[in-house]
Image (cartoon, coloured by chain):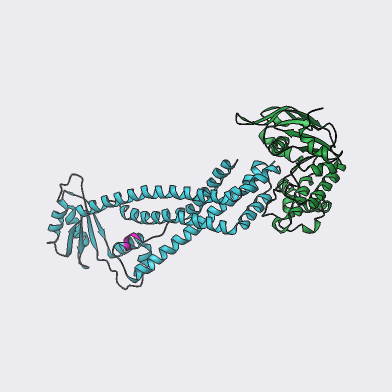
């Protein structure tokens, strides 16, 4: 599904966001990406949905080397990947329905079909009664659920989430994680970047740790106990 | 893949509606930017009309109503310095006035008698010596049936020169103002688009092609420019009508000459199109920088 081979990303000559990263994420996996602030989590995700190209190395997503993807092909690639952001990134002038159906609207799908799909995904996140609301009329948790609905409306094979619970309280965070787990059960590969170790521990999934741009895979899943959670980002490769 | 027009128009309308105040502000700025050079074009056009009357006569002989026009004209034509003699009847003078001053000419419609006496216009050969015009006018004053005779040789050439200079300066200044207007329109559009920078980024992240991101903004900006140009035109026409009304109430010898006819249909069409093009250009520049 996702393969990174010796991937590096530099901003200027002296800022190395990612260094020589090599890892694989299998189809249908649920993986957490963790690490302290500035470790390179967001950069890692940006490379995966081609918000930025790598400085060196190869990134294969569904068998395509997206590092060398021509700019004209990037929008089409992005439609196959669902992305959820910490700040939701909803378009304020659009309703919930319009935000979710944006790409389908660009593609010229009939409005009835757009509505049917939007209703389906909103029902999955429990917001089907808010189709015509504007983002500023919703709570933070609801906005994030709309963002998740938008991310999965095109039935992507890969869902990326960058600190999706960063602006939410623990109860809402749990709810969002449950949604991700449900999406994963249906076959979508899910990669969530977070530094909420408590959440990671409770979910009991595979964890990739980033520290100063280098990846360190934890030898065990972080479901052993709180102590292991605290140590996880600093564990060396086994 | 070609974009659906429903998407482009729908998005453009949504952009305009979401920032109604900014849209109105941009239209107002565009209208003001285009109004100033358009006003200049209006004055310049009227000046041009004054200088475009062709070669002015060296002498004009005003006749009594019952004078023998043809006899006097033939008498004038005998002079070897004279190239052309033209008889201008009262009716022809009135028609000429109406052609030159279409709006003021209508005011003379209800008169029983024509207000212009018949005249003879004399134009000289290039070889004629300086002062020939006044000499001919002086001689003509002695002829029977002549009410008056004036030499316009020097005044005519000086007036034509002055008009040419003023019009040249006007065109130059008008060109500078038009360029400034286009840049102002582009700036107004750029400012408006800056408000949508975040959503442009989101649209790109969601997988919208560059065309899908830009086309609605191009359309929105072009429509703003078109509306601004139309508003500038309306303001200009309002100013023109107001000027005419004020001049009718208290006629002014100079302003009445410069404020006679409105822009032609070409200029009328050009103004909104100029706004539309400037709006489109502004959005293209802005979105290219936004990439």
Q: Colour of chain A?
A: green
Q: Quick one: quadrant of the N terminus of chain B?
A: top right
Looking at the image, residue B201 sits to the left or right of residue B237; the answer is right
Whether residue B61 is visible: yes
Q: Quadrant of residue A2?
A: top right
Q: What residue sits 42% from the left and 55% below the top?
A: B36
**What's drawn in magenta, residue-wise?**
B255-261
Where is residue B14 shown, x and y percent of the image? 65, 55
Q: Is residue A155 visible?
A: no
Q: Which of B79 and A238 lies nearest the eye of the viewer?
A: A238
User: Percent from the top left, x then y, of residue A117?
Assistant: 80, 50
In the figure, A196 relative to B107: above or below? Answer: above
Is residue B138 toward the left or the right of residue A53 in the image?
A: left
* Residue A166, horizontal then vertical, whole percent: 73, 47
Residue at (50% x, 50% y) in the render: B185
The color chain B is rendered in: cyan
| Residue drawn at point x = 61 percent, y = 50 percent | B196
Q: Is residue B15 magenta?
A: no
Q: Quadrant of the C terminus of chain B?
A: top right
Which residue reaches farthest front? A227
Query: Depth check: A47 or A80 in front?
Result: A47
- Please, is residue A145 above or below residue A208 in the view? below
The residue closer to the viewer here, A231 or A42, is A231
Residue A109: x and y in percent read 75, 48
Q: Quadrant of residue A180?
A: top right
Corner quadrant of residue A156: top right
Q: Is residue B259 magenta?
A: yes
Observer-nearest of B71 and B275: B275
Question: Position of A178 compared to B204: left or right?
Answer: right
């Amino acid at each position: 599904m996702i393969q990174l081979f010796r991937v590096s990303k530099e901003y200027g000559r002296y800022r190395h966001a990612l260094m020589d990263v090599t890892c694989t994420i299998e189809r249908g996996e649920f993986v957490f990406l963790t690490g302290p602030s500035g470790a390179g989590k967001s950069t890692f995700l940006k490379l995966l949905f081609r918000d930025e190209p790598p400085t060196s190395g190869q990134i294969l997503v569904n068998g395509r080397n997206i590092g060398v993807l021509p700019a004209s092909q990037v929008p089409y690639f992005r439609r196959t990947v669902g992305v959820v952001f910490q700040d939701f990134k909803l378009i304020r002038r659009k309703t919930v329905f319009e935000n979710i159906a944006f790409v389908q609207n660009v593609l010229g799908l009939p409005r009835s079909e757009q509505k049917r799909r939007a209703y389906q995904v909103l029902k999955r996140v429990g917001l089907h009664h808010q189709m015509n609301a504007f983002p500023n009329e919703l709570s933070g948790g609801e906005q994030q659920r709309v963002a998740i609905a938008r991310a999965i409306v095109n039935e992507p094979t890969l869902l990326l989430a960058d600190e999706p619970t960063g602006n939410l309280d623990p109860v809402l965070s749990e709810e969002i994680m449950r949604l991700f787990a449900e999406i994963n059960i249906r076959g979508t590969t899910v990669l969530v970047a977070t530094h909420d170790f408590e959440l990671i521990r409770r979910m009991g999934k595979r964890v990739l740790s980033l520290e100063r741009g280098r990846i360190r895979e934890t030898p065990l899943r972080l479901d052993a106990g709180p102590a292991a959670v605290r140590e996880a980002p600093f564990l060396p490769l086994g | 893949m070609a974009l659906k027009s429903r998407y482009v128009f729908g998005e453009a309308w949504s952009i305009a509606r979401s920032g109604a105040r900014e849209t109105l502000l941009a239209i107002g700025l565009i209208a003001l930017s285009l109004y100033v050079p358009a006003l200049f074009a209006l004055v310049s056009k009227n000046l041009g009309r004054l200088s475009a009357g062709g070669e002015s006569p060296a002498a004009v002989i005003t006749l009594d109503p019952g004078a023998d026009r043809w006899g006097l004209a033939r008498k004038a034509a005998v002079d070897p310095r004279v190239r052309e003699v033209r008889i201008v009847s009262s009716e022809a003078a009135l028609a000429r006035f109406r052609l030159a001053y279409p709006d003021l000419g209508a005011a003379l419609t209800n008169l029983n008698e024509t207000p212009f006496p018949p005249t003879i216009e004399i134009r000289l050969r290039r070889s004629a010596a300086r002062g020939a015009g006044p000499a001919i006018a002086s001689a003509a004053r002695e002829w029977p049936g002549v009410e008056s005779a004036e030499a316009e040789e020097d005044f005519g050439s000086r007036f034509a020169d002055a008009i040419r200079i003023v019009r040249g300066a006007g065109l130059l200044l008008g060109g500078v103002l038009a360029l400034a207007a286009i840049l102002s329109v582009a700036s107004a559009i750029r400012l408006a688009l800056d408000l949508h920078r975040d959503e442009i980024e989101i649209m790109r992240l969601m997988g919208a092609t560059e065309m899908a991101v830009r086309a609605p903004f191009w359309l929105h900006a072009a429509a703003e420019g078109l509306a601004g140009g139309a508003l500038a035109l309306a303001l200009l026409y309002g100013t023109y009508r107001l000027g005419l009304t004020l001049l009718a109430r208290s006629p002014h010898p100079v302003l009445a000459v410069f404020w006679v006819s409105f822009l032609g249909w070409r200029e009328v069409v050009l103004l909104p199109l100029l706004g539309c093009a400037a709006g489109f250009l502004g959005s293209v520049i802005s979105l290219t920088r936004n990439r």
